Amino acid sequence: MRLLDQGVTLTSDVESTILLDESTTAGRRDATKTPNRPTFGLFVSCAVVIGVVMAVSGHSNSPTPVHSSAAVLGDRSPLTARAGTFMHSKSCEWRLDRAAQENIRCNPRGTDVVVVDALRAVYVDVTKAASESIRDRLEEAFGASWNDPKYADQSVYDVGPHGKIKTRRSTTASLPDEVLSNYTFFTFVRDPIERFASAYRQTFCRSMCQGCEAGKTPTRPPTIEQTIDLLEIMREKSASDATFCLLKDGSTNEWNFLNNPWLDEHLQSAVFRMSGVTRHGKKIPIHFIGRVESLNEDWTRLLDQLSVSAKHGARAPLERIDHMCDIVERENQLKAQIEAFRNYTIEGKRAPQKGDLYEPVRVVYDGVGRAVQIPEPSTDRGIYVDRFHTLYEDDYRCLGYDEK
């Protein structure tokens, strides 16, 4: 199976199905060969007030349970300098609505959430943004978990290599109207570069581990540049084909990246996850957004807004949890690619292409072990840093992060 027809001969174990036809390929190249995007620095009006409870988006009947002034939260690094304007500008509302429509098509089960009845609050899980630290604290301090049978969708299944697995997680689509209308919804976000680096490690160590579980070869992950290529292809196919996310039985399948516009949930944009839909097909409300870069400061402000006692154990500093890949050889490869991403890609340079840690792969394996041929990395469609910013443009424009 081929993602992009570039005249590469298929190996005998690869299906000869082209996922991106030549006309689409040509259009993609024409559209991205010479990027002509407005400068991100001009879009200050989309930046969110971080660490401030506010109405950002939501259910038609959702109130703003807690109110606060639009104050900038103390000193910020250059990455977090834009905290003085609201996310609910017209431009960002449009982006949230667009993301919600994509959720309806490709993620109707919704974004994972933790309902905290003791606080009348809901944590919206943005992956790779201190989510494990926050979930652990909510369970320790308030007994709240996304596995709570009171809110978990008992009919939700994930389809993996070993068949259907019941997840029993609470999601935006499993929440009752009482929660949607009366609870405070909060989340935390992270600089897109650091979040992508962490997501790349988890994605290709676990759910897209190049056939590790099936003992297939090669076991190297695709390079960072190839991952950006794959994301571009999947996102463009999703945008041009309303049925892209559907399987033959009409259902969606998170395990099979061939039907996933973000390849894997960890690579989804923060705006996409914040736009998870309810059972009514509406995007959820978001009342408070904190930053990982100021995690404990914003966590404290959130608990203040939720009237948590000053002596409550929930106020202890949150500890960041960073995972390494437990497959040593693969961790070495992932670490090398992440360093190349930071030192080369984001600086507008080509990443190294030679050696076991840097050489591009020819195929990746989907969730059921099928080999899919992928293109060689190329700058024919523009330099990778610009293409990365385009992929996560919603997060840059609406969450107040700078490109650098």
Image (cartoon, rainbow, N blue to C red):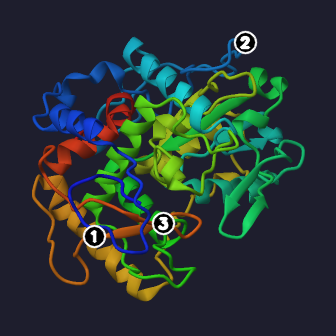
Residue situated furthest right in the rendering: 150
**Element type at mark 1:** helix
Residue occupying the point 41% across, 21% down: 92
The span from disc 3 to disc 2 (Cα, nearest Å) is: 37 Å
Residue occupying the point 9% across, 57% down: 349
Q: Earlier in the sequence, mark 3 or mark 2?
A: 2
Which percent across, then down, holds residue 147?
80, 54
Query: Mark 1 Cα within 10 Å, few/some/many (few <14, many 20+)?
Result: many
Which percent across, then down, holds residue 294?
43, 47
Quadrant containing the N terminus in the rendered view: bottom left
The span from disc 1 to disc 2 (Cα, nearest Å) is: 46 Å
Q: Earlier in the sequence, mark 1 or mark 2?
A: 2
**Element type at mark 2:** loop
Which percent across, then down, holds residue 178?
84, 24
Amino acid tagged 1: Gln
> What residue does disc 3 label?
202
Nearest-to-viewer mark from 1 and 2: 1
Amino acid tagged 3: Gln
> What residue does disc 1 label?
337
Residue occupying the point 82% across, 46% down: 152
The span from disc 3 to disc 1 (Cα, nearest Å) is: 13 Å
The label number, if any, that marks residue 131 in the structure image: none
Residues at discs 3 and 1 in contact (Cβ within 8 Å): no
> What residue does disc 2 label?
61
Residue occupying the point 40% across, 48% down: 19
Residue 366 horizontal side relative to residue 358, left or right = right
Residue 8, image quadrant: bottom left
Q: Is residue 306 above or below residue 260?
A: above
